Amino acid sequence: MMGWPEGTARVVLEVADSTQTQAFARSEDAPVWVLAHRQTSGTGRRGRPWQMPTGNFAATLALRPKDAVHRRSLRSFTAALALRDALSELTGQPALFSLKWPNDVLCRGRKLAGILLESRGDVLLIGIGINLAAAPAHSVLEQGSTAPIDLLSASGQLIGAEDMLDALAPAFAEREARLLREGFDPQQAEWMRGATRLGQPIVARFAHHELSGRFDGIDADGALLLSTAEGIQRLPAAEIYFNEAG
């Protein structure tokens, strides 16, 4: 296992309102990882509450990216690949894990982890939640969402939150360095190799409509490419669901 990345601060809190809030408050020390063993006001995509049963993982990296602002969103793919790296290393079972656009990591085809990107001025906050010990109840999930799973039941291994952080931080640092050095193309190709439902039917939902089509990958900016009867649709943002045909 790689050591903690040089120049990156590490903060562990027993309880926090939100690791996003706490990481931003410490962003003068960026890059800085903030882990909380318990969150009282964690949120996920589109402001949805993030359920955090005891023993699960919640952490945020505050980062000041060194490339163009419009490239910040690529860190969702960098983070997903780093998280898969760390999970594979800790469990020794890489075949368990796959990637779901734009920012989820799946285990046995179910949602294990989510990634939330938030920009505040020149600071990028990368929040990560992982079901290490328990999955949230189905009753709190949006209808049609990918079913959740926890790492303990999926792999038979109970991994502590701090051990998870100590594997994730260096994995992300390595991926970030490669992104800056090599550009997005290698990560784009690697992400697609690990993507679930590539070449299969999916449903992309928006506020007032939805599109069905074949998931044909992502482009150089991370947008989803959906093949429909009207041609290839480029989707910078959407909620993705798996239909029965997929």
Image (tube, rainbow, N blue to C red):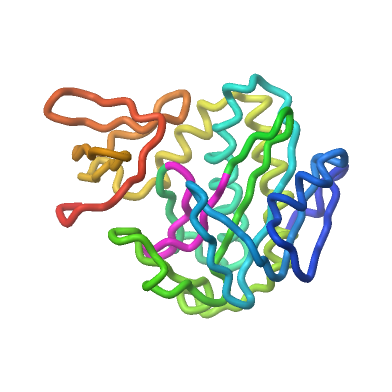
Name the magenta segment's main secondary structure.
Answer: strand
Query: Quick check: is 244 in the magenta stretch?
Result: no
Image location (x, y in percent) of residue 113 = 51, 59
Taking 217 as reference, is 36 left or right? right
The residue lying toward the viewer, choosing from 42 and 168, is 42
Looking at the image, the residue that sits furthest to the top is 68
**Residue at image x 62%, y 77%?**
54
Relative to 23, does residue 166 appear above or below in the rendering?
Answer: below
Image location (x, y in percent) of residue 91 = 57, 68
Location of residue 57 by image quarter: bottom right
Looking at the image, the residue that sits furthest to the left is 229
Taking 3 as reference, is 131 left or right? left
Q: For the magenta stretch, what is the residue range?
A: 102-116
Taking 148 as reference, is 186 left or right? right
Taking 9 as reference, is 201 left or right? left
**Residue at image x 56%, y 60%?**
88
Image location (x, y in percent) of residue 26 = 84, 46
Relative to 3, does residue 78 appear above or below in the rendering?
Answer: above
**Residue at image x 17%, y 31%?**
228
Query: Quick check: is 108 in the magenta stretch?
Result: yes
Image location (x, y in percent) of residue 12 = 81, 63
